[in-house]
Amino acid sequence: MKKSPLKQILVIEGNIGVGKSTFLRLLNQRLMIDPVFEPHDKWQNVGNGENLLEKFYTDIRRWAYTFQTYAFVTRVLEQEKQLKKCLTGVQVMERSVYSDRYCFAKNCYEMGVMQPLEWQLYRDWFTWLVDGYTVKPTGFIYLQTEPSICYDRLRMRNRHEESAVPLDYLKRLHEKHEGWLLNKEGVTDSLKDIPVLVLPCNQDFEHNEEELNKHFASIVEVFGLNYRSTQTKPEQAISL
């Protein structure tokens, strides 16, 4: 496994529409971290302006393997790019190559939109690259949210590539996240010892200061992060 100069690498995980980007943005405002957002811009503008994310949702059977491959590459490249500018020693990433593997790619295979040969190829190069060239996270932060609520939030943000995403697809991904993060289904031994902080996020946290403070207090308590100097510690921080 590749070594890293970072003190911690935390990953925010969760279903589509849960609010990971918003949560990471708010986290960055209050805690001493360096954020690494999902590289949506790279997925939406490949080569000569090709929108791979849109192609994936429009014709998932044709583009499943291609998208999952490119998602892996761009995640790793984005993390390495942000590492050069890291000031706090703590990277917090929006999703990881692990959720790609245990949730999205696995779901594509089980839905029959990724062929058995493609799934085998994916797992082979994934294992080789992860073991040799990526950095193991020190913790996962799981924004646990009911699929129906994710569906409503997805509709509210109105990203046109996701307009055709059905509720059933979100339910399948929810089951995959629960199985991977909570039950450790099919994961390698090297991942089983990584702590997972579960934050119940059915309630709106973006516009609810009390709810947001509870989540951030949990993160500070479990992972030992520090508040920014301009941010005072909330009085109602919870004890775990």
Image: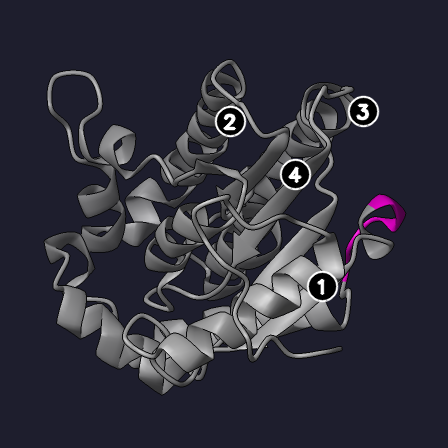
Residue appearing at x 50%, y 43% in the figure: 229
Residue at the farthest top position:
84
- Is residue 75 something one can see in this rendering? yes
How far separated are the C-alphas under marks 2 and 4?
A: 10 Å
Q: Which mark is residue 183?
A: none
Residue that numbered label 2 is attached to: 79
Pick whichever, 201 or 114, lies toward us: 201
Please state which amino acid type lies under the numbered disc 1: Glu
Residue 84 higher or lower than 234, as above or below: above
- Inspect the magenta stretch and tell me whether residue 234 lies in it: no
Give left or right: position of 186 versus 34. right
Per the picture, the main secondary structure of the magenta-coloured stretch is loop
Whole-percent x, y for residue 34 in the image: 50, 34
Q: Secondary structure at mark 4?
A: strand
The residue mark sitting in front, 1 or 3, is 1
Residue that numbered label 1 is attached to: 221
